Image: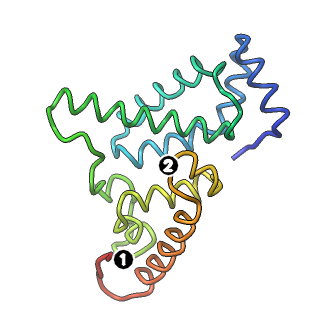
Amino acid sequence: MLCFSTEKENELIQTAISGGERAFKKLTEPYIPVLYNYIKLKTAEHADAEDILQDTMLAVWQSLASFSGLSAFKTWMFSIAKRKIADFYRERRAETEMIASFPDDIAAADVWENTDGNLDLYDALAKLPEEHRELVYLVFNAGLTYEEIQSLTGMKTGTIKSRIHYIKKTLYTLLTQKGDGEYG
């Protein structure tokens, strides 16, 4: 993922605020695939993920002037995406009168493709609770620091570190065991 220096990022933000669409595109384009995959992790439906991504990018554009710089720009974008995901589920609940929580178990076939039928990393990840898959994604795919994850999730840095340690141990166990042991 392309990262800008803080100075260059601030310059792009100011240009985008002044109506510079090219600056906005240059500023946000590196984060779009990572944001999309994060949203897809939470929704498991391609069309829903695309809609939420569009809503997220529109909100980023509309509220760019309110970006205070207290967090990293990418963290700020993730917080907007997280709110848009929550909005999506609130709207869905209102429409379907169903429970407004995230799905407990995102279908592994939709999110983690397994081509050979053997226990592999994708199968092991699919066995993790959604909250743990989110942490794995934020650390290893999105490249967020523990401090950025803390500002996004409200979880303490020490808790994040201990959960990541526990997740790594669990994944190691799942990947080295024979059979289909359950995640405990």
Depth check, front residue: 123 or 71:
71
SS for callout 1: loop
Q: Quadrant of residue 180?
A: bottom left
Which residue position is annotated with label 1?
Answer: 118
SS for callout 2: helix
Q: Quadrant of residue 26?
A: top right
- Cα separation, mark 2 vs mark 1, equals 33 Å
Residue 66 on image: x %, y %: 63, 22
Relative to 95, say whether 4 is above or below: below
Mark 1 nearby-residue class (10 Å; few <14, some 14–19, many ≥20): few
Depth check, front residue: 151 or 42:
151
Judged left or right of residue 143, residue 5 is right
Which residue is depicted at the point 58% across and 35% down? Answer: 77
Which residue is depicted at the point 83% across and 32% down? Answer: 8
Image quadrant where one finds the C terminus: bottom left
Residue 156 on image: x %, y %: 54, 58
Which residue position is annotated with label 2?
Answer: 153
Relative to 132, say whether 63 is above or below: above
**Which comes before the other along the chain, label 2 or label 1?**
1
Depth check, front residue: 112 or 158:
158
Judged left or right of residue 50, residue 75 is right
Depth check, front residue: 145 or 40:
145
Judged left or right of residue 88, residue 24 is right
Residue 1 on image: x %, y %: 69, 47
Residue found at the very far right of the displayed protein: 7
User: The residue under label 1 is which amino acid type?
Assistant: Asn
User: The residue under label 2 is which amino acid type?
Assistant: Thr
Residue found at the very far top of the displayed protein: 19
Q: Quadrant of residue 118?
A: bottom left
Residue 114 on image: x %, y %: 38, 65
Which residue is depicted at the point 54% across and 26% down? Answer: 57
